[in-house]
Image: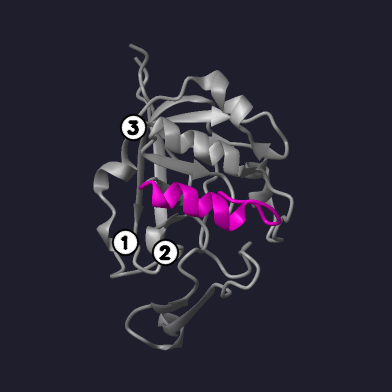
Amino acid sequence: MAKIGWIDISVPIKPGMARWPGDPDVRIRLVQDIKKGDSNNLSAISMGSHAGTHVDAPFHFFFKGAGIDTMPLGAAIGPARVIEIQNSTCVSKDELRTYRIRRGERILFKTRNSRYWRTAAFMKKFVYISLEAAEYLVAKQVRAVGMDYLSVGGNHKDGVQTHRKLLEAGIWIFEGLDLSRVKPGRYDLICLPLKILNSDGAPARAVVRRRPKS
């Protein structure tokens, strides 16, 4: 049997990459440089807490919400299901009903968004999770939700509302995934954010591995 390998579904952090409007630019510069005679290379990195692939903590939208350092490891490590969304506007409740989502699942949504990582421009009309769909996910008591662009909520609709609905229910949010090389199905997932004390979110490295069919 061929060995099933891990697939990296995180996007590279780099200057000029797509970012949410108003978020800080990514800046990376060498403060020590071997080419200039230093004994080693050392970089200074500046970016927002929601740059690229990242995890949202409840504190992102709730003043007394938990920080990213309190995220239970079980939310981001374990079985996950990649669902390919056909709707070109949003993840809708009607479409979700066809997938028989169960309590405790980690759900990653693959949409047309994944192709947007080919450009550094922010794409305003990305597929998002509608508030009605978020309410459905809350009712199903999923453990975590992942989206293949910079927000689970829309740019012009259901932005704050979708975030608040999911986070208030204790559902952890993974954003900025690149699922372009991942087929729908069941996987093992690891998506661990940096452990930043009391932070509203943090960049993460996310990988998946296809689960063998039982």
Judged from this view, the residue extending furthest toward the top is 214
Q: Which mark is residue 207?
A: none
Q: Quadrant of the C terminus?
A: top left
Q: Which mark is residue 104?
A: 3
Which of 24/208 is in front? Answer: 24
Looking at the image, is mark 3 or mark 1 earlier in the sequence?
A: 1
Q: CA distance from mark 3 to mark 1?
A: 20 Å
Which of 73/172 is in front? Answer: 172
Residue under pointer 2: 62
Residue under pointer 1: 66
Q: Is residue 151 visible?
A: no
Q: Is residue 75 above or below residue 33?
A: above
Place residue 39 in its image quadrant.
bottom left
| Image position of 32 (left or right of 148) | left
Element under disc 3? loop
Q: Is residue 172 visible?
A: yes
Q: Which residues are magenta?
A: 151-170
Magenta run includes residue 159: yes
**Residue at point 41% right, 63% down?**
201
Which of 125/163 is in front? Answer: 163
